[in-house]
Image (spheres, rainbow, N blue to C red):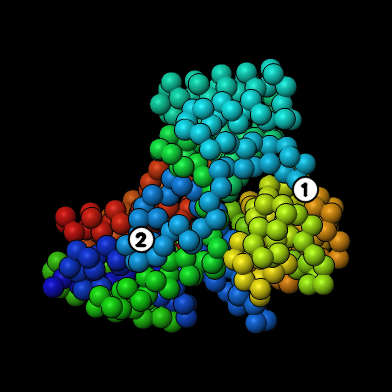
Amino acid sequence: MKHLTIVGGGWAGLAAAVRATDLGWQVRLLEAAPALGGRARRIHHQGLVLDNGPHLLIGAYTHTLALMQKLGLDTERLFWRMPLNLRNPQGIGLELPDLPAPWNLLWGVAGANALDWRDKLALLGVATRWQRAGFVCTPGMSVVELCAGLRPRVLSHLIEPLCVSALNTPMDQACATVFLRVLRDALYSGPGSADFLLPRSDMSALLPDAALTWLRAHGAHVELGQHQKICPTAQHAGDAVLLACPAWEAARLTQTVNPDWSAQAAQLSHQGIATVYLRRPLSSEGHGPAHEQGHAVLPRPMLALDSGPKAPAQFVFDRGALSGDPAQRGILAAVVSACQGEREHVTPLVRAQIENQLGLPDLQVITTVVERRATFSCTPGLVRPGARIGPGLWACGDHVQGPYPATLEGAVRSGLEVVDQLTQG
Ligand SMILES: Cc1cc2nc3c(=O)[nH]c(=O)nc-3n(C[C@H](O)[C@H](O)[C@H](O)COP(=O)(O)OP(=O)(O)OC[C@H]3O[C@@H](n4cnc5c(N)ncnc54)[C@H](O)[C@@H]3O)c2cc1C
């Protein structure tokens, strides 16, 4: 039996471990942290179960959903599914009806109430051009350049929220090629591909817990608290090592093994994400229609927000409505994508933003989680490191060359694909 050592138990490493075990490798997975999941995992705070950051999946995450099903998870029950909806509390923004493409887009744009008919025609014209060109554009273009001809309010109400939620990079710095690829897959991968899938559970229950159980049941060795300070080497011919740790760690581990690969991984810059957890005092009642047993605070379990320098959050999730768990009742998670600010600066701004925009007074701050290196900056012309580092040494993760920005689907696909490659030699 050939041995595969995997360094890192985030979603990429877990996907790789499951695929390799299935293909007959003897897998040893070494994870530095006391728990699996990497950037998409549960955290505990003062007796509460929260996430390192709430995640939004879409129907086009086919590999991630298939992996969950393979692990025995019921993806229908795990998610709150709703058609793409980027409307703010005032109802401004894009909402796609539950129709097949391109009718969903036509209907959604026609109903975008902040736009006049010239904006709508311009947007549909641009979208038609993108589709005719096969969702491919000149390499090196930014999203703002791609959208030249659209007026500022179209950019701010429609393009910017889509871009920041998908690429976690502001649209003037974001790669148009990747943006178009995400749009293509979201809009044209079949019914429901653009749907939002909002996790009802914490992020560890969404995949890492089940992966750990499955891997151990299938003979893989999973070792937690094993921070690798030097790059492991393959012991026998045919064995392999897979670095499934983030770019900066993979760069450090490969400095002497393959300096060029290491330099390419090290040059990636990153964007932060901050999550401000707030709680509506438990004595108050939810002000919107109750989704589940009166646990809802918001009119929908996820709302887009009007954002700007003084109101930095773009989205807010209602954890009580999503989970139906009394312990989560009244807990809101407000997300600041492409976050530059410090915790002390961001927290009061977000609290005031939610209070003002949603009319929810007296919110208590539970905690703010700041991930400084949440995703790589998905900039035009970016060259990402490849999966092959050297003989018997491979890499996977959301940062490794691939069509997607730093997402769960990008991580999972990378983990699955690298195992197919290293199995072929
Ligand atoms: C706050 C936040 C919100 C996000 N929101 C979304 C979203 O809504 N939708 C979406 O699709 N994506 C989202 N993402 C991105 C998504 O979480 C990542 O793309 C994905 O989790 C990356 O997985 P990975 O396995 O490539 O890397 P990681 O999750 O970083 O996993 C790497 C693992 O390697 C381990 N490790 C590191 N160094 C070593 C070492 N030396 N030895 C052993 N182990 C090591 C780490 O502990 C970690 O467990 C978000 C990310 C964050 C941080």
Q: Which of the pair 173/146 is nearer the observer?
A: 146
Give percent across and percent down for residue 319: 64, 64
Q: Which residue is mark 1?
A: 309
> Quick check: can you spot residue 39?
no
Given this view, does label 1 or label 2 mark the residue nearer the observer?
A: 2
Give me the residue at 57% from left, 22% from top. Answer: 124
Give percent across and percent down for residue 55: 55, 58
Q: Quadrant of residue 92?
A: top right
Give percent across and percent down for residue 122: 62, 19
Q: Is residue 67 above or below residue 33?
A: above
Q: Which of the pair 173/294 is nearer the observer?
A: 294
The C terminus - image quarter: bottom left
Q: Is residue 120 above or below residue 230?
A: above
Left or right relative to 84: residue 245: left
Circle 1 crowding by C-alpha within 10 Å: few under 14, some 14–19, many from 20: few
Q: Which of the pair 73/93 is nearer the observer?
A: 73
Q: Which residue is mark 2?
A: 69
Left or right relative to 135: residue 116: right
Type of residue at label 1? Pro
Sequence-wise first label, 1 or 2: 2
Give me the residue at 62% from left, 67% from top. Answer: 324
Give me the residue at 80% from left, 60% from top. Answer: 351
